[in-house]
Amino acid sequence: MNDEKEEQVIKSRNPENYTFLDKEALAKYTTDTGKILPRKYTGLTPMQQRKVSKLIKKSRHLQLSL
């Protein structure tokens, strides 16, 4: 029963609600070589871009591959 609730949890599409564990979501904001995409390509606001960049860097530091 607990497994069903975990599967039903829908990931937010708002970058402000991401955590450093959301690999699939953060992978959208990086290139194939691992570079962080600029705002020009992501379409994020400046505040969202800073948060996403920090989350990607934190994920890298903890060696969670994106």
Image: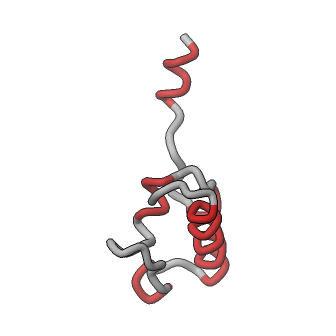
Residue drawn at point x = 57 percent, y = 67 percent: 56
Please identify the quarter of the rendering in which residue 51 is found: bottom right
Percent of width and height locating residue 21: 57, 50
Quarter of the image that includes the N terminus: top right
Q: State whether residue 4 is above or below residue 26.
A: above
Q: State whether residue 42 is above or below residue 27.
A: below
Please identify the quarter of the rendering in which residue 54 is found: bottom right
Percent of width and height locating residue 64: 53, 54
Residue drawn at point x = 56 percent, y = 60 percent: 14
Q: State whether residue 10 is above or below residue 27.
A: above
Percent of width and height locating residue 27: 42, 63
Residue drawn at point x = 49 percent, y = 19 percent: 4
Q: Nearer the viewer, residue 41 or 59?
A: 59
Q: Nearer the viewer, residue 44 or 54?
A: 54
Residue at the extreme left: 32
Q: State whether residue 12 is above or below residue 33.
A: above
Residue drawn at point x = 62 percent, y = 83 percent: 46
Percent of width and height locating residue 65: 47, 57
The total of numbered circles placed on residues is 0
Residue at the extreme bottom: 40
Task: Identify the image's colour scheme: rainbow, by chain, secondary structure or one colour.
Answer: secondary structure
Residue at the extreme top: 1
Quarter of the image that includes the C terminus: bottom left
